[in-house]
Amino acid sequence: QLPLYLASGCVFGFLSIFITKSIYFVEDLFDRLPIHWMWWPLLGGFGVGVIGFIEPRSLGVGYSNIEFGLSASISLSAALLICFWKFCSWTIALSSGTSGGTLAPLLTFGSLSGFVIGTGLKLIFPNINIDVHIMALIGMASVFAGCSRALFASIVFALETTQQPLGLIPLLGACSLSYLISHWF
């Protein structure tokens, strides 16, 4: 399974690039608004509020969403919806200057996208022998490594929070590839 986990590290590296570029793109859009920057957080807060009405699970820190991805206790469609709407609200919030963090949202994107990729691979190739839980763990750490450029911190953080030493080798490889791809591009 190791080659699949390593290949997923490449996918998460490109996902990290997409996340980072999206933040800068939306920041540039806010910069072009013909209103004073002081009003940007108001617009951002309004956007986050509208998204919260559409998908309430996208609001807040999102630790439960991370847990859903790692435990594989969520449906594929729910994971996709939460990931999409959380990404939209987080991008708007950060780009507008609204207060918010980066750690939990990145871990949410990573764990849910890892769950989606792992579940999708198992659906497409039923004989494949990968663990969706490990794929979610790899996703969580690899997206964080690619976006934050904190390679070893992401690996240690993933191992410390989940206490799953079985994921060490896939984590080292996938996070390294995600970091390198994000760094190169």
Image (tube, grey):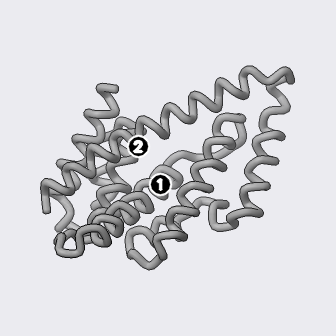
Rendering quarter of residue 178: top left
Q: Earlier in the sequence, mark 2 or mark 1?
A: 2
Residue 79 lies, with reference to residue 103, above or below; the image says below
The spot of residue 10 in percent (x, y) is 27, 43
Crowd rating for badge 2 (residues with CA inside 10 Å; few <14, some 14–19, many 20+):
many
- Considering every residue shown, the one lying at the far front of the view is 124
The spot of residue 92 in percent (x, y) is 68, 41
Report the amino acid beneath label 1.
Phe
| Circle 1: element type | helix
**Residue at mark 2 to residue at mark 1: CA–CA distance:** 9 Å
| Circle 2: element type | helix
Crowd rating for badge 1 (residues with CA inside 10 Å; few <14, some 14–19, many 20+):
many
Which mark is in front, 2 or 1?
2
Q: Residue drawn at (47%, 50%), measured in percent from left and top? A: 106
The spot of residue 75 in percent (x, y) is 48, 75
Report the amino acid beneath label 2.
Leu
Relative side of 22 to 48, left or right: left
Relative side of 180 to 88, left or right: left
Instruction: Please identify the quadrant where the N terminus is shown.
Output: bottom left
Relative side of 146 to 10, left or right: right
Residue 149 lies, with reference to residue 4, above or below; the image says above
Relative side of 37 to 171, left or right: right
Residue 109 — which label? 1
Q: Which residue is mark 2?
A: 15
CB contact under 8 Å: marks 2 and 1:
yes
The spot of residue 144 in percent (x, y) is 39, 46
One can see residue 136 in this view: yes
Q: Residue drawn at (54%, 70%), measured in percent from left and top? A: 78
One can see residue 160 in this view: no
